[in-house]
């Protein structure tokens, strides 16, 4: 599908079908109100109505705000993809909702067909957005940026959706190297021998039973005079079987998505480099497979992390925090960043706390929390803040090591996981760090908003929005 923004009046564009977004109020005033009434169209949010003989498609929306337009544009593109039209055109409503239109079309129209022997044929080829009233140059910038970010989100979705027999820590590293080559990023990859030399005892333990070598991937985007330096860290469990604390069969299905944090940070650095932002960005990925076997790490093991902090393993399914402990330490030692953000499908508890649509946001800095919540609202992603407290922190106490990898009580699991990571954040970085639990928001088995089945690309849009505005 090609999407373009044209400096033209909609009536001057040749397309098989024209689309109008209508609020219930606008419907009453519309020239076609009678026939739309007869068709039972009430302009309800996400409803659609074709008037084929007139070459028109109407899309209902509660308002002209971004969140409603994004969702309406998703319904539009999905309806058009099931039709036989080849080209479509519609007018830009206003500058504020242009990005949402692009997201609705690109993200709502996304499909992952890699493993289908006969993918459904889509006739829709050309999508034109028209505007000749507003400042076109400004609109074009908004359009181009939104397209870069939406495509980076699809890039993230594509990796998340890949099956675990194909996408393992080693092939993940190859894929990251390819991204580095195509986007002129620096790339440094540490395989197991290097990880041993670097004393990454926690990360290595998690991947020990896998036939694939664990990999630490470091990509960097370095413009000439950066305003800020940002480190992004991603959990990249290409499969999480739970290890010896084996997951029940039903919970294991979908655990290829446990690499979504890593896929998101790759999408972010891709977006930043294509937006040519004036900030230096480092993406660190811990790519590991959590499996069972004679060599598997065990509950009762005591691991020595890179930082020297010893960890009592009480549950091998709480593996993401072990990988992140070492990667966060490495990231802090390698780059002196102004901010450190980690992204991880870390806990089922985050979904219990916030629901499956919302990313959990944790950290010490009120300012970062505020700025990132705002960026998320502007991007259309949902975030909710989960507060740390000293009582939950005490639940990570271990009798035989410095810290236990799971809390001694079952409540507040997303927060205790965040507090575990906090243990590996240096004092001078406490106010520079934020942790994002994307366990619920990164993957879906039923479509919602502009998300379709599979990886959603959670994090890419709000982080790009935040970095754009630094
Ligand atoms: N990868 C899972 C978390 C997860 C669960 C992500 C469901 C997406 C959907 C993580 O490694 C895990 O297994 N966490 C455990 C922690 C527990 C053992 C303290 C969990 O959430 O049950
Ligand atoms: Zn796990
Ligand atoms: Zn996991």
Image (cartoon, rainbow, N blue to C red):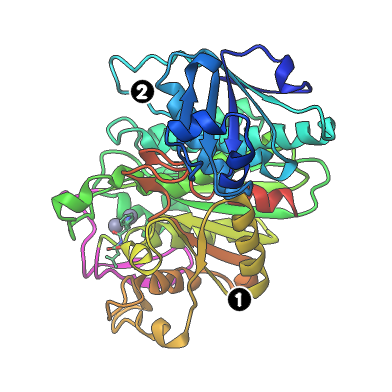
Whether residue 161 appears in this view of the structure is yes
**Front residue of 17 and 335:** 17
* View extreme (bottom): residue: 391
Callout 1 crowding tier (Cα within 10 Å): few <14, some 14–19, many ≥20: few
Q: Secondary structure at mark 2?
A: loop
Examine the rendered structure and indicate whether residue 203 appears above or below residue 102. Answer: below
For disc 2, the marked residue is 114
Residue drawn at (68%, 59%) of the image: 336
Magenta-drawn stretch contains 300? yes
Examine the rendered structure and indicate whether residue 55 appears above or below residue 180. Answer: above
Image x and y of residue 277, in percent: 75, 42
Circles 2 and 1 in contact, beta carbons < 8 Å: no
**Front residue of 343 and 168:** 343
For disc 1, the marked residue is 427
Disc 2: residue Cβ within 8 A of ligand 1's nearest atom: no
**Front residue of 3 and 239:** 3
Magenta-drawn stretch contains 363? no
Residue drawn at (48%, 72%) of the image: 386
Q: Which residues lie in the magenta part?
A: 291-315
Q: Quadrant of residue 56?
A: top right
């Amino acid at each position: 599908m090609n999407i373009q923004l044209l400096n033209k009046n909609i009536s001057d564009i040749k397309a098989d079908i024209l689309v109008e977004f209508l609020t219930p109020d606008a419907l009453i005033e519309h020239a076609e109100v009678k026939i739309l009434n007869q068709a039972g169209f009430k302009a309800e949010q996400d409803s659609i109505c074709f008037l084929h003989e007139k070459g028109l498609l109407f899309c209902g929306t509660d308002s002209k705000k971004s969140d409603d337009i994004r969702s309406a544009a998703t319904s539009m593109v999905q309806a058009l993809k099931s039709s036989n039209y080849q080209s479509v055109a519609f007018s830009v409503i206003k500058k504020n909702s242009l990005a949402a239109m692009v997201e609705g079309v690109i993200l709502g129209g996304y499909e992952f067909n890699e493993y289908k022997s006969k993918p459904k044929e889509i006739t829709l080829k050309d999508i034109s957005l028209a505007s000749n009233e507003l400042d076109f140059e400004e609109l074009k910038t908004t359009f181009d940026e939104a397209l870069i970010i939406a495509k980076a989100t699809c890039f993230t979705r594509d990796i998340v959706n890949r099956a675990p027999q194909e996408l393992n820590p080693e092939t993940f590293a190859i894929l990251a190297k390819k991204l580095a080559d195509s986007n002129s990023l620096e790339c440094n990859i540490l395989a197991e021998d290097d990880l041993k030399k670097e004393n990454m005892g926690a990360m290595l333990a998690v991947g020990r039973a896998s036939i694939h070598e664990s990999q630490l991937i470091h990509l960097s985007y370095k413009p000439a005079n950066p305003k800020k330096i940002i480190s992004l860290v991603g959990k990249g469990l290409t499969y999480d079987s739970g290890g010896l604390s084996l997951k029940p069969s039903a919970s294991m299905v979908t655990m290829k998505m446990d690499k979504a944090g890593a896929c998101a940070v790759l999408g972010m650095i891709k977006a930043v480099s294509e937006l040519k932002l004036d900030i230096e960005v480092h993406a660190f990925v811990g790519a590991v497979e959590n499996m069972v076997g004679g060599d598997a790490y065990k509950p009762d093991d005591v691991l020595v992390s890179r930082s020297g902090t010893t960890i009592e393993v009480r549950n091998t399914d709480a593996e993401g925090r072990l990988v992140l402990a070492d990667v966060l330490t490495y990231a802090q030692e390698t780059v002196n960043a102004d901010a450190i953000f980690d992204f991880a499908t870390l806990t089922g508890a985050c979904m219990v706390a916030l629901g499956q649509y919302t990313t959990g946001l944790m950290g010490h800095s009120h300012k970062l929390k505020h700025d990132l919540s705002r960026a998320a609202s502007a991007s259309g992603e949902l975030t909710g803040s989960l507060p740390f407290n000293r009582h939950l922190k005490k639940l990570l106490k271990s009798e035989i090591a410095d810290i236990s990898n799971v809390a001694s009580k079952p409540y507040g699991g997303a927060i205790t996981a965040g507090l575990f990571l906090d243990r590996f954040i240096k004092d001078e970085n406490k106010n520079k760090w934020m942790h994002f639990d994307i366990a619920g928001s990164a993957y879906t088995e039923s479509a919602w908003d502009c998300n379709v089945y599979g990886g959603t690309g959670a994090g890419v849009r709000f982080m790009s929005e935040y970095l754009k505005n630094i």
